[in-house]
């Protein structure tokens, strides 16, 4: 288990992760950048609202990426079947 300390929105968070410490730091940096961008766009919003918006945006991006991966998997499966059909002939 890796112990990593990260800074998000000016606050320090000690985290534990089974993954790579560099990946955790990169994830925290991505979150921090997203929070900063939303806070600049909505200066009247409190941190809670900014955090919720950031989470929803990031979850939406994840869903879009998962959908693209499923489409690509379907494409690869079809290509594999075509190749196998040619090889079998």
Image (cartoon, rainbow, N blue to C red):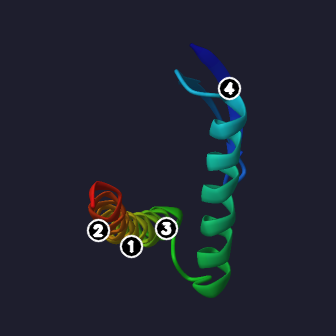
The answer to which of marks 1 and 2 sits earlier in the sequence is 1
Q: Earlier in the sequence, mark 1 or mark 3?
A: 3
Of pointers 4 and 3, the one earlier in the residue sequence:
4
Quarter of image, res 78 = bottom left
Q: Residue at x 35, y 57 (%)?
A: 87
Q: Position of residue 38 (x, y in %)?
A: 59, 77
Q: Judge from the rendering whether residue 3 lies leftward or rightward of residue 89; answer left or right.
A: right
* Disc ID at residue 54: 3
Question: Element under label 4?
Answer: strand
What whole-number distance in Å separates the C-alpha atoms at marks 4 and 3? 22 Å
Residue linked to disc 2 = 78
Q: Nearer the viewer, mark 3 or mark 2?
A: 2
Measure the C-alpha gap from mark 4 to mark 2: 43 Å
Residue carrying label 1: 64
Residue visible at 34% across and 71% down in the picture: 75
Q: CA distance from mark 1 to mark 3?
A: 15 Å
Mark 4 = which residue?
4
Disc 4 crowd rating (10 Å Cα; few below 14, some 14-19, many 20+) is some
Question: Label 1 to label 2, Cα distance in Å?
Answer: 21 Å
Question: In terms of sequence position, does the residue under pointer 3 or pointer 2 come before the other?
Answer: 3
User: Marks 4 and 1, how far apart in space?
Assistant: 29 Å
Mark 4 in CB contact with mark 1 (< 8 angstroms) = no
Res 25 quadrant in image: top right
> Which of 69 and 40 lies nearest the eye of the viewer?
69
Q: Nearer the viewer, mark 1 or mark 2?
A: 2
Q: Is residue 21 above or below residue 73?
A: above
Left or right of residue 83: residue 44:
right
């Amino acid at each position: 288990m890796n112990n990593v300390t990260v800074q998000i929105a000016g606050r320090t968070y000690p985290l534990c992760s089974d993954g790579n410490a560099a990946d955790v730091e990169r994830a925290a940096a991505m979150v921090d950048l997203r929070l900063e961008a939303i806070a600049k766009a909505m200066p009247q919003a409190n941190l809670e609202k900014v955090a919720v918006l950031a989470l929803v945006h990031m979850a939406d991006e994840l869903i879009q990426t998962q959908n693209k991966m499923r489409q690509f998997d379907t494409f690869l499966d079809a290509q594999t079947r075509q190749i196998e059909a040619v090889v079998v002939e």
